[in-house]
Image: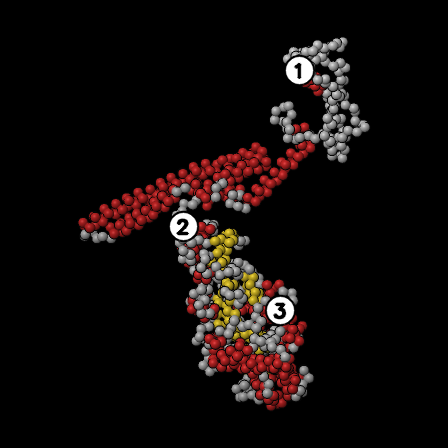
Amino acid sequence: MTENHAEPHTPTTPAPVEPTIATVTFLRPAIPAPAPVVEEDGWSDMPDDTDPTPVVPPMPTVAPAIGPDDRTIILDTARVILAKTTTPASPPVAGKAEKVDLDDFDDRPLIPAWMHSAEGWAAWAGVFARARRRDFRRWVRRQATQKGHVRQFGRGVRRSHEWVVGFEGVRVQSAAHTAHVATREARLAARHARFTPRIMGSKRELAMKAAERATKAAEEAVLLHKKAKKDRNRARNLRAGVAYGPPMAAIGTGYAMGGGIGLAAGLLSTFAGGAFVGRTPYDEDADWTSEWRSLGDGDRMTAPMLDQSFRAAKVIGSEESLRVVQMPMLDTRGAWTAVLDLPPGIPAKRAIRATDELAAAFGVEEAQVSIAKRGRSGRIELYVSRDLPFTDKAKPGPLLALEAAANFWGPISIGPDVRGLPISISVVERSGLIGGEPGAGKSASGNTVLLAAALDPRVILVLADGKGGGDLEPFEHLCEAYEGDADPEAFYEMLKERVEDMKQRYALLKKLGKRKVTEELAAKYPELRQLLLWVDELMFYTTDEEYGKKITKLLRNLVSRGRAAGIITFCATQKPGSDVVDTSLRDLLSIRWALRCTTPEASDTILGKGAAASGYSAKTIQSEMRGAGLLWAEGTNPTMVRADYYTDEQVEQLLARATEWRRVAGTLPNGPVPLVDQLRAQGDDDALLLAAVLDTFAAHATEDGPAQWLPGQLLLDDLKAAGHTVTAEKLGALIVRTDEEKTKRPWGEKGSRLAGYPLARVEATATGRFGLTA
């Protein structure tokens, strides 16, 4: 393209040549308006009166000359105009801070922009501090695990010690055993040679040679033993220097060079070295095992282990597996617990029946495994304790913390289960049976119910001790009726009175229009208060030839009909078989507590037929688990529970508290009236005189009790001092003695022989003349 510069010229008449280009009119170019931008403060960048006027280049004054060869002149002119057209930059807004990109870099390489501002340094320091805080918390949480530094150091010390000890001890023990055997043989050979007669020349010579060989062999064995010990000590000392030398040197050098700070640095370096040596847990580096591991070997409970154990116990098939609902975990007592779903079609009772086989698969005792149905037929809760349960010291029972009277209408605390959770039962309209072998803890277990009843002032106690051993004697003063002499006839009479009481209760209920006794009804009518009938060693009463069947009949009547009348019956015996307790009575006792038994059959007599076959047998209770038993009171299956234990001192303390509460409530039974008070109540002169005589015997009591014999003159002097007008003849006529009782006896320090009166004769006179009871 040829440039054509436009110059001014005078118009002339053009020659008729080729057509020319049309006339072009140059217009003022329009400046495109910038797009409106709204700032954060609400202002807009739209032009207004305050904005400066954009600069527009001047239009050319002379039109360019257009020649025949200049067809693109219009485009060139447009380019010139557009190139000279400029848009001024928007002026900066006053007061706005310029934003800095902290992730940007300046002209120097790898230096971020945040390093040039205090805010950037603060943000970086905050991120660093938070990261270090998270690291510290993570480190603290790690210390409780197997990878904690303290445990690592412990493992390191143990491994170092094991390395120092080495295996040379086995050689020393073998050499010692050989030396002992050789020495004994040499001693026997020498003795045989010494006692062989000289007349037996050849035999004596052979015996001497044998003794020499044995002695030489024994000496060599002793030398080998000494050499083995020397080699062992040398090797151990060398390894001990390698293992313990650097830590001791670091600690000693640090203390010598830097004092306390150096000592701390030496200890820290020693700790770090030990932690480094023990950084790998034992269960990862010491698993030399076989294909079979178990909980008894210290392994963790895992899903593969559960499948393997349940298959070995024949609970599930070889191709079946369990579904883990709750992953195996350790509780605060160190026991493993998990919730599992058995394969379809396998009920929970199959796993419960296989408790013994599962315990063998887990490598623990049967008593350590507890399986219970959880919510549905095929779901079980597995609990495997680390140690044999219920062998630790029992904690104080909850009754000791009572500050007010107990409520026998509510739940009664029995004791903890294998998980340590408290178990409570309700005895309202219930009856119970406690059984187990001698020494299983029936008396201590029964105290949980007896003490709860005693601490409720509203409960009437009626106790019978068929053992006659005094276990129930501390409760005697709280009882409405008490039989402690193991007398079947007296117990039979006691039951007859209870049956009459039951009839009176039902008569009152019928009059009130009520079906059964409630707590509100008993509070309104004291004669309807709860009555606890406790029978210890029931076997002694029911096996009596004369009264056994009568007692069984009355007990069956009370158990079957007395529940609604507020009469609660509990029986305890060693083996409640059908030959001891009739099944018609035993089956009515709803609460069953089976303590340790010697056979599964004995356990079934308490829990019911088939309980042992279903996996609930009191035979599995070990002798160390004293007071533990299978309690079947609430729910569909028995629960292993250990009764709360109360010492004799604690029982006395609780009974003293119960006595005071019953005295305040006015429900303390009236005890037997002393013979002295009965005589004074007669109002007769002779009765008052006999009461004074009994007071004199009580005044001269010793540590063994009241005096059993007193001189007549002493009695006369004390009676006259008490204001009674009496002579020796009158006293002798009132208390008639036999010739033997009139015999003189020594009395006092001088041993003077005097005539007197025995206490037994005075009591016999009082009871015989006035019809009283001693």
- Does 152 sit left or right of 66 as displayed? left
Q: Nearer the viewer, mark 1 or mark 3?
A: 1
Instruction: Answer whether residue 735 is visible to the viewer in this image.
Output: no
Name which of mark 2 and mark 3 comes first in the sequence.
2
Q: Amino acid at mark 3?
A: Asn
Q: Is residue 731 above or below residue 22?
A: below
Give the residue at mark 2: 292
Q: Residue at x 18, y 52 (%)?
A: 199
3D distance between C-alphas at marks 1 and 3: 120 Å
Is 287 placed left or right of 560 in the picture?
left
Viewer-closest of 361 and 408: 361
Residue beneath disc 3: 407
Which of the numbered marks, if any, corresponds to residue 71? 1
Please identify the quarter of the rendering in which residue 686 is found: bottom right
The N terminus appears in which quarter of the rendering?
Answer: top right
* Image coords of residue 413 (percent x, y): 57, 65
Q: Secondary structure at mark 3?
A: loop
Asked if residue 569 shows in the view, the reply is yes
Q: Amino acid at mark 2?
A: Trp
Residue lying at 73% horizontally and 26% vertically, measured from the top left: 32
Residue at the outermost front position: 16
